[in-house]
Image: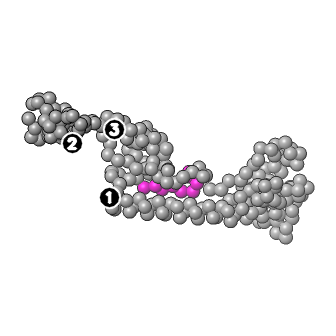
Amino acid sequence: MTDARLPGYWLTELRFMDMTDRVWRIFTNSLMWSAEQGTDGHVSSRHYRFLHAEGVTDADIEALVSAELAELTDDGFQLRGWSDERGLRQSPAATVAAYRERKRRNQAVYRGRRKSEQESGDVTGHVAEHVGGGVGLPLGSNSSRGASAYVAGHVTGNASRFCAKHPNGTTDPCWACKAAREAAEQTEAENRPKRHQFGAPALCPSGEHRWTADGTCARCINGRKDGAA
């Protein structure tokens, strides 16, 4: 998905304030169309039908030229200063293409790493595949940080590793699921029995063991539920 930019300061520029609603719509539609098609501001006459539902006239194009927003070409018009910071401030098609390719490579590396971890047994529990498409994460975000949101391990007790919207997990990016998983892990860590080795007896008196989930005693060193006194 691509986006066209409409800087806020355009609201107070006379060339935009003096536009009719019709010409403003043609202008903004030309920004969106060109950004999506990767033409860097060039619009041919055969594509004018995408700029306004009622069609585009020569007078409409002349209004854009008079506002110094466009110049005529042999087959249509060219928006002026497409990627100029003092002009229209739009993203060049080459920059958009490079971003998409970089994101595609990052996603391929991420999926390959997850697959390798699952096959080698480095990841415990279920690993939900990351299937982000387009611009799934905010620009500038760290993909490796986002990836951790999709690792769902074994659920113990009443701690849920997923958000209320996805009680059974999801393959879509979800920061709420990530937060739930981290909170569950913290709760499990806090509730995990702590074994005191220093000064602990070799074996508790009969009937005084405090059994943990792994069948050992939290108080003594050698007590085991399957054969202790």
Residue visible at 21% across and 34% down in the picture = 199
Alpha-carbon distance for marks 2 and 3? 14 Å
Which secondary structure lies at badge 1?
loop
User: Is residue 39 rendered to the left or right of residue 178?
Assistant: right
Q: What's the residue at 24%, 37% (across, down)? A: 198
The residue pinned by badge 1 equals: 121
- Ranked by sequence position, the earlier of labels 2 and 3 is 3
Q: CA distance from mark 1 to mark 3?
A: 22 Å
Figure check: 164 above or below 128: above
Q: Secondary structure at mark 3?
A: helix
The secondary element bearing badge 2 is classed as loop
Identify the residue at the far front of this view: 199
Q: Main secondary structure of the magenta part?
A: loop
Q: Position of residue 119 (x, y in %)?
A: 34, 62
Q: Circle 3 sits on which residue?
A: 188
For image coordinates 49% across by 63% down, the residue present is 108
Which residue is painted at 89% across and 53% down in the image?
67
Report the front residue among 117 and 167: 117
For the rendered model, the colour scheme is one colour
- Residue type indicated by callout 2: Asp
Q: Disc number at residue 182?
A: none
Q: Along the polypeptide, which appears first: circle 1 or circle 2?
A: 1
Q: Circle 2: is it few (<14), some (14-19), or many (20+) Cα within 10 Å?
A: few
What crowding class fits label 1: few (fewer than 14 Cα within 10 Å), some (14-19), or many (20 or more)?
A: few
Which residue position is annotated with label 2? 214
User: Circles 1 and 2: CB distance less than 8 Å?
Assistant: no
Q: Quadrant of residue 189?
A: top left
Q: Amino acid at mark 3?
A: Glu
> What stretch of residues is rendered in magenta?
129-137
